[in-house]
Amino acid sequence: MGKASSAPRAAFIFLAQLVSVAGDKMFAIALSWWVISNAALPHPEWTLGLLLAASSLSSAVSGPFWGRLIDRHDKRLCMVLADVSRLLLMSALAWLAHDGGLTLPRLFALCLPLFAFEPLFDSAVSASLASFADSPPMLARWVALESAIPNLGAVLGALLGSFALAAGVEAAFWFNAGTFLVSCLLVSGLPALPACTEPQEADDEALSLSKRYPEAVRLLVLFGAINFFLVPVFLYLPLLVRDVLSADGSRLSLLELALATGNLLVFGCFALWPREFPRIRRLRFFLVALSALFMWGLGVAESIEAMLAILFVWGGALAFVTYLMFSSFQRNIADSHKGRFFGTLTSALTLGFPLSFACFGLLLSRFPLPTVIVGNAACVALVSLAFLTIPDR
């Protein structure tokens, strides 16, 4: 199939991402609220941290394995496998919620494989983008769209999250199962996306990527490190709603919506007007350092209006950094290695999640929330200096 038909193929994949991410966001909001509001749990903050840590660990560990699978097999079939597996797991979780049998051990047992299949779908999409583009500007546009679609899904999920919580946790779970079914049907209608026919070396594992692309791997690892200090915001938000705002789950949806909307607007601008930035070393540093300021502001804010404004602008800064990174990777990584690279990228970006959620969950159970957030912001400011060591190209 020629380049003229590549845009409709990309549209189907992006639409599949949209519906599944919308369901995932509803699920994440409902899951966080189920843990935080469960009176039967003695330490809900610690429990939420452990659940997010365990789920993120399964995603990080599975990334390199899925990357090798993607490079050797049809990428469309990889997406279908991911959707079918998550559909079955999510349906089981929804049925337990419906039947009243949802316990913490069962929740852990189903969430771990559920999150483990997520990198399979996302990495297969990332590895397919170059086949849809016939020019560098078009590839930059697909990069922006790939990043924007999950954030658009997050916006829709956050908008619907309050309605799902009003209907109960079970409704959010069933909705998410349905999104995986829709995604599977959309992807199944695509033509094959075969593996690269280029011969592969016997030692062509994720570790060897550091020899081929040393600067890209350094940047990848550095983003994984900074994520350790950035991802606790998803622990802070439900606690800010409960302890600072003294509000219900609908306010949590609004805060999630503000962060996702800021992301979406920046990605939308780059999708419409793709461009390259020749000197990005200082720009990356500035945007990450700015995140420290936003996190500090979140820790001292006392009104929902201030929190919404901070999260909106912060979301835009994070989107800008992501666009710079993914555009560089798509241009510089060979197609025959993209499955492994993006599988490793998924692991690098989430490897800090498990330890971060566990550590900050423990800190939140022992220290006041504002103190933890301000200390976290200071760590982000320090780590941002390391981005100055990565060259522009």
Image (tube, rainbow, N blue to C red):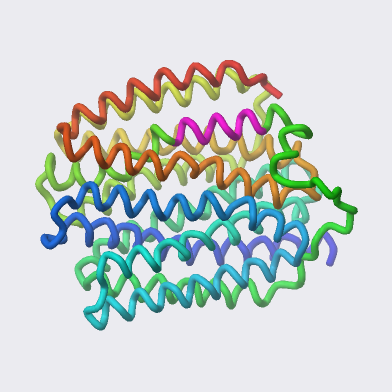
- Is residue 303 shown left or right of residue 59? left
Quadrant of the image containing the N terminus: bottom right
- Using the rendered view, name the quadrant where residue 360 is placed: top left
Left or right: residue 386 compared with residue 344: left
Horizontal side, residue 211 vs residue 115: left or right? right
Residue that lies at the very extreme toward the bottom in this rendered image: 99
Picture layout, residue 75 above or below residue 311: below
In-image side of 158 versus 180 (left or right): left
Whether the magenta-drawn stretch holds residue 224 is answered as yes
In percent of width and height, residue 266 lies at: 49, 39
What percent of the width, then of the height, locates residue 275? 66, 34
- Helix, strand or loop: magenta stretch: helix
Q: Residue at x 88, y 58 (%)?
A: 197
| Quadrant showing the C terminus | top right
Q: Residue at x 40, y 70 (%)?
A: 176
Q: Quadrant of residue 154?
A: bottom left
Q: What percent of the width, then of the height, locates residue 346?
A: 57, 47
In-front residue for pair 352/147: 352
Question: Which residue lies at the image location 58% right of the left edge and 38% below the top edge?
Answer: 323
Q: Quadrant of residue 124?
A: bottom right
Examine the rendered structure and indicate whether residue 171 appears above or below residue 148. below
Which span of residues is magenta-colored? 217-227
Q: Please tell me how many numbered marks the rendered image carries.
A: 0
Q: Residue at x 14, y 47 (%)?
A: 242
Viewer-closest of 341 and 8: 341
* Place of residue 238 in the rendered image (x, y in percent of width and height, measured from the top left): 23, 48
Say if the magenta span includes residue 205: no
